[in-house]
């Protein structure tokens, strides 16, 4: 069963031992609703920024900025608002740029490329599109943020912390196994050597 935002929050509430379930993230009538509303997006961003999650990644062509780049590169491209983590930059939509050089600076990609296609991890439009193990890792991260106000026992806090580590490791392992992609950086000299044989 895929989890939406409310399901993830309720799983986190259950992990800390509370029983004040929420019905919506927009309501702020209960303590649990206010805390989930406050900490949910932070927990999502923390988990998504730790790995190249394939179930929450996309490729998009970026528009060039009109401002001058801050570095020695010729062009600057602004990151999309939903970008959590940059995976790679390509010069075409085929997803292959063996010799492109770029730098991430102040939420801009600075490069000498004429066009930029960005592969990145994004905030999900629909949380049900996330893998169940990734949703569980987010719930554990949220539980860790909620725990200081619910949990007074250090041992229970330690159990939640250990559960978060395990959930994140499992989610990363499955995501990696299900999506095998080899990103080997090409070398001009190696390519030339191979072409000469």
Image (cartoon, helix red, strand yellow):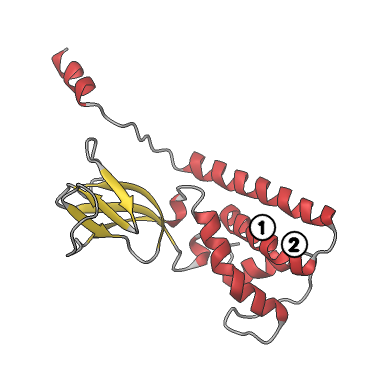
Q: Helix, strand or loop at disc 2?
A: helix
Instruction: Identify the residue at image location x=52%, y=65%.
Output: 128
| Residue density around tag 2, few if under 14, some if 14–19, many if 20 or more, within 10 Å | many
Observer able to see residue 4: no
Count of numbered circles on the image: 2
| 176 sits left or right of 116 in the view | right
Query: In which image quadrant can residue 47 be found?
Result: bottom right
Which residue is depicted at the point 45% across and 63% down? 123
Q: Position of residue 89 (x, y in %)?
A: 28, 47
- Left/right placement of residue 183 relative to residue 65 reads right
Task: Determine the residue positioned at 61% across, 80% down.
Answer: 24
In the picture shown, does residue 178 fall above or below 194? below
Q: Is residue 51 above or below residue 65?
A: above
Residue wearing tag 2: 15
Q: Nearer the viewer, residue 127 or 49?
A: 49
Whether pointer 1 and pointer 2 mark residues with C-beta atoms closer than 8 Å, the reply is yes
Horizontal relation, residue 87 to residue 175: left or right? left
Classify 165 as above or below 84: above
Query: Which numbered circle lies on residue 47?
Result: none
Residue 10: x %, y % from top left:
68, 70
């Amino acid at each position: 069963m895929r989890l939406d935002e409310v399901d993830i929050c309720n799983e986190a509430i259950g992990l800390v031992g509370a029983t004040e379930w929420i019905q919506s993230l927009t309501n702020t009538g209960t303590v649990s609703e206010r805390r989930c509303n406050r900490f949910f997006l932070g927990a999502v961003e923390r988990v998504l920024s730790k790995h190249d999650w394939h179930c929450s990644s996309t490729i998009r062509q970026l528009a060039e900025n009109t401002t001058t780049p801050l570095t020695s590169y010729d062009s600057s491209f602004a990151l999309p608002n939903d970008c959590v983590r940059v995976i790679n930059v390509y010069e075409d939509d085929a997803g292959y740029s063996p010799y492109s050089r770029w730098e991430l600076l102040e939420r801009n990609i600075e490069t000498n490329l004429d066009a930029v296609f960005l592969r990145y991890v994004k905030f999900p439009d629909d949380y049900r599109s996330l893998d169940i193990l990734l949703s569980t890792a987010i719930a554990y991260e949220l539980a860790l943020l909620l725990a200081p106000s619910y949990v007074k026992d250090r041992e229970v806090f330690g159990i939640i912390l250990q559960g978060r580590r395990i959930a994140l490791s499992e989610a990363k392992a499955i995501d990696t196994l299900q999506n095998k992609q080899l990103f080997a950086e090409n070398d001009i000299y190696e390519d030339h050597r191979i072409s000469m044989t």
